[in-house]
Amino acid sequence: TSLAAARDLYASAAYDDALAMLDGLASATRARDERQTIDLYRALCLVALGRPADADTAIEAMVVRDPMYRAAGEDLAPRVRASFVDTRKRLLPTIIQRQYGEAKAAFDHQEFERAAQGFSMVLDEMADPDVAPQTAQPPLLDIKTLAAGFKELSVKLIPPPPAPAPVALPPPPV
């Protein structure tokens, strides 16, 4: 069983068989990108089988796993594309708030590099067109201001890398 075989089953409209294969693939430990592809095809199969609630659950898992993930729009039916947008609009504000809290906790623990990365991620997600209108009002507006300030401060507080060890010179010839 492979992802390519599951794609072939999906392409041939063998949705139940593709879904069974994808479920088997999903149960194994996978890289995040591969897991996203598996869940995308799971969602497509579930939509084709008339199981929109299950498809929405698969899409939610994808957004939670990688909030910046965007499925290739030209390959998706308008209904699936709309489901992605709706799910992202619904989940991103909560994900952003959680990630801000994690970045702030890192800052409070003086883990400035991790904090700076977290605040950057928050700001990147807030620039996403699916959530941008919500960032113009509280609480995301406040989080945006705080994340920008804490990111700048975190970057300034990252300690410089240690200086290279001095090279021992050989003793001078006698």
Image (cartoon, rainbow, N blue to C red):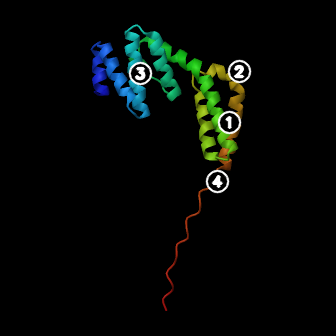
Nearest the eye: 33 or 55 = 55
Q: Position of residue 99 (x, y in %)?
A: 61, 32
Rounded to the nearest whole Å, what is the CA distance between mark 4 and mark 1?
A: 19 Å
Q: Position of residue 62 (x, y in %)?
A: 48, 24
> How many residues crowd around disc 2 within 10 Å: few (fewer than 14), some, or many (20 or more)?
few
In the rendered structure, which amino acid carries the disc numbered 4?
Pro
Residue visible at 52% across and 17% down? 85
Q: Earlier in the sequence, mark 3 or mark 2?
A: 3
User: Could you tell me the amino acid type at mark 1?
Assistant: Ala
Q: CA distance from mark 4 to mark 3?
A: 41 Å
Q: Nearer the viewer, residue 112 or 148?
A: 112
If you read the primary sequence from the N terminus, does the residue marked by circle 4 or circle 3 appear first?
3
Residue type, label 2: Gln
From the image, tell me which residue sits under label 3. 40
> Contact (CB < 8 A) between labels 4 and 3?
no
Residue 124 placement: quadrant:
top right
Q: Residue 152: x percent and y percent?
A: 68, 42
Q: Is residue 2 above or below residue 156?
A: above
Which mark is first along the chain, 1 or 4?
1
Q: Which residue is mark 4?
A: 159
Judge by depth and name the residue closer to the eye, 60 or 78.
60
Mark 1 and mark 2 lie on one chain; the one further toward the N terminus is: 2
Location of mark 1 (residue) = 148
**Disc 4 from disc 2: Cα separation:** 35 Å
Quadrant housing the N terminus:
top left
* Residue 20 versus residue 156 in the image, above or below: above
The residue tagged 2 is 137
